[in-house]
Amino acid sequence: MRLVGEDGAQLGVMPTRRAMEIAIEKELDLVKIAPAARPPVCRIMDYGKYRFEQSKKEKEARKSQHTVEVKEIRLSSGIDVHDFNFKLRNGLKFLQEGNKLKVSVRFRGRQMAHTSIGEQQLIKFAQACDELAAIERLPKLEGRSMVMFLSPRPQTRAAAKTAPKERKSE
């Protein structure tokens, strides 16, 4: 087997028994790194310390991950322009943060006869978010609600992380 020392130095090709003796002399473990290689590659190391460092790296990786949440915005079929723009601003903010967006229109009573109005509202919302989001699921009627899903475009997340925060001028 090919042996690598604890400092990364190549110790050469030797029998397994000799590699075990060297590891025991140094009071360390003999760990197979590449068992499929010819000859197999082994390393002398403190295996407990190695596992501890690996778990630390995994924790750091989990900490830096961003979990994608699904935020919801509810519209009505008779929504006014100002209210629509207010909800649009909130939706754009959610998309810039990298979250998915569920946009729904709830129909009440006789509004069920005019579901096309709600569908138009959802399409108008999607067109307004076109720069930041892609339609993941087109508007679909589910019971008394029409639902559409938007997901942030990949370059949006990267740009949001690198872009400086704007300050409001007084």
Image (cartoon, helix red, strand yellow):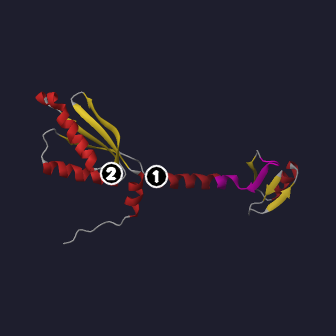
Earlier in the chain: of badge 2 and badge 1, it is 1
Q: Position of residue 1 (x, y in %)?
A: 83, 50
Q: Amino acid at mark 2?
A: Leu
Q: Answer with left or right where residue 42 lies relative to residue 122.
A: right
The foreground one among 147 and 120 is 120
Which residue appears at 13% of the width and 51% of the height? 82
Tell me the distance, in whole angstroms, between the alpha carbons under discs 2 and 1: 17 Å
The residue range painted magenta reads 37-50
> Dot 2 corresponds to which residue?
95
- Residue at 85% x, 58% y: name it: 12
Is residue 142 highlighted in magenta? no
- Residue shown at 74%/60% (left/top)? 6
Evaluate whether residue 15 shows in this view. yes
The x and y percentages for residue 84 are 17, 48
Is the C terminus in the top left, top right, bottom left or bottom right quadrant?
bottom left
Element at label 1: loop
Residue beneath disc 1 = 65
Residue 118: x and y in percent read 19, 37
